Amino acid sequence: MKITVQKYGGSSVADADRIKNVARRVIKSQQPGEGLVVVVSAMGDTTDELISLSQQINPEPSEREMDQLISTGEQISSALLAMAIEHNGAKAVSLTGNQVGIQTDDSHTKARIFKIDSRKMIEELEGGRIVVVAGFQGINIKKDVTTLGRGGSDTTAVALAAVLNADSCEIYTDVDGVYTADPRVVPDAVKIEKICYDEMLELASLGTKVIQNRAVEFAKKFNVVLHVRSSFNERPGTLVIEEVEGMSMEKVVIRGVSLNQEEAKLTITLVPDKPGIAARIFKNIAENNINVDMIIQNVSAQGFTDVSFTVPRPELAKTSALLEKIAGEIEAGKVNVEEKIAKVSIVGVGMKSHPGVAATMFETLAREKINIMMISTSEIKISCVVRSEDGERAARSLHQAFELDREEE
């Protein structure tokens, strides 16, 4: 059976009218004899509202109870969409992450999928039903509900497409596809017709919010073709594939500029410059399921050094408290926290064969009198941490410097 997986984000199912619109779109796309699986996010700002409500009840709730709470948003939207599909004359069934057989590890609020039992889905598809799945959630070995982190419905959709060997995975959102930059920040941003997994993975991990980076990891691992497009029109979007044919690496250097204003910087001062100290610091952080991004260690002076790194801003309070404890244990100095930072990045597989890309980036920021606080590089990306107030200006100037405002040929 040919199977298609579609995913609709929170803005696409934000209210009753939009859910009805998605239902009509889903029914229109269903082909005779073919299977259709639809993954949905929570309606609009439901997840944020549930988090806010939890803070009014308990400022420090357990992560288990948070998963139990915020997973309900997707269950509501999936049930409502199934009702809307049935009201329009088609057969549908809504399933939770547990019912669909998504098994995860025990990392509450950011669990990872390790197995999917597809038998229930296949049974429903063979019965001619459109399967509507509550995204963002699974269940661990203890039978506790787990969630997959922000944007986790994308990961749900791609994982289901992989296990079902689906012909395509369509990610519907409120934008027309993947752009060379966030159009809300860079008005001259241009839609990209095709982009390879590696470039999309870097853009997603660096703060581009169109699709979750873990979903791109899944797609690359299992070779799932993604089509990112708008749920509000019929225009084609952006294809995310293994390799973009016809792209000359000698010509295409930078594909996109990303801006992330949701990270924070921490510095632990006067760290004893001894073997094993850095390992001890970051092992403790890893054991608390905190993702560290950029790391810088200063040159040692008189047997001591400073270590700086960035983390997602929602993890700041947890990380800061942990770092204060570690600092005491290793007899380091104080812990400094800086919330008002932004990370601006350029991405493109072509840059590894083009010398001078980094120089152009640094010269551009220098002309704008934007100070660089941290730098991180790989073969296909360069990231700079700057002051928060300089972030948008940095993104616009880099977009112009690398001529990304020109339409693709």
Image: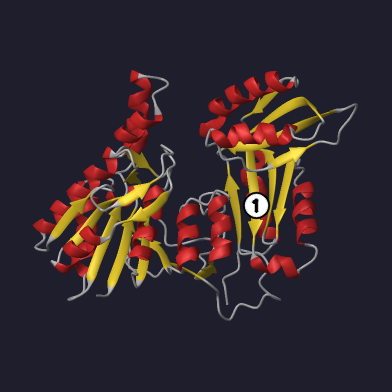
Q: Is residue 68 above or below residue 322?
A: below
Q: Is residue 107 left or right of residue 346?
A: left
388 lies left or right of 108: right
62 sits to left or right of 306: left
Residue 221 position in % (x across, y down) = 49, 64
The residue closer to the viewer here, 307 or 52, is 307
Percent of width and height locating residue 89: 9, 63
Residue ID at (33%, 29%): 65
Q: Which residue lies furthest to the bottom in this view?
A: 246
The local secondary structure at tag 1 comes to: strand
Q: In which quarter of the image is the N terminus?
A: bottom left
So how many labels did they put on this image?
A: 1
In this view, the residue in front, 383 or 111, is: 111
| Dot 1 crowding, Cα within 10 Å, few <14, some 14–19, many 20+ | many
Residue 349, located in which quarter of the rendered image? bottom right
Q: In terms of depth relative to the viewer, which is nearer, 190 or 259?
A: 259
Q: Residue at left 31%, top 64%?
A: 5
List the residue tagged with mark 1. Answer: 345
Determine the image quadrant of residue 6.
Answer: bottom left
Q: Is residue 232 visible?
A: no
Q: Where is residue 378 in the image (x, y as percent from the top left)?
A: 70, 57
Hey, what amino acid is under mark 1? Answer: Ser
Q: Quadrant of the C terminus?
A: bottom right
Residue in view at x 37 percent, y 19 percent: 58
Percent position (x, y) of residue 312? Answer: 55, 37
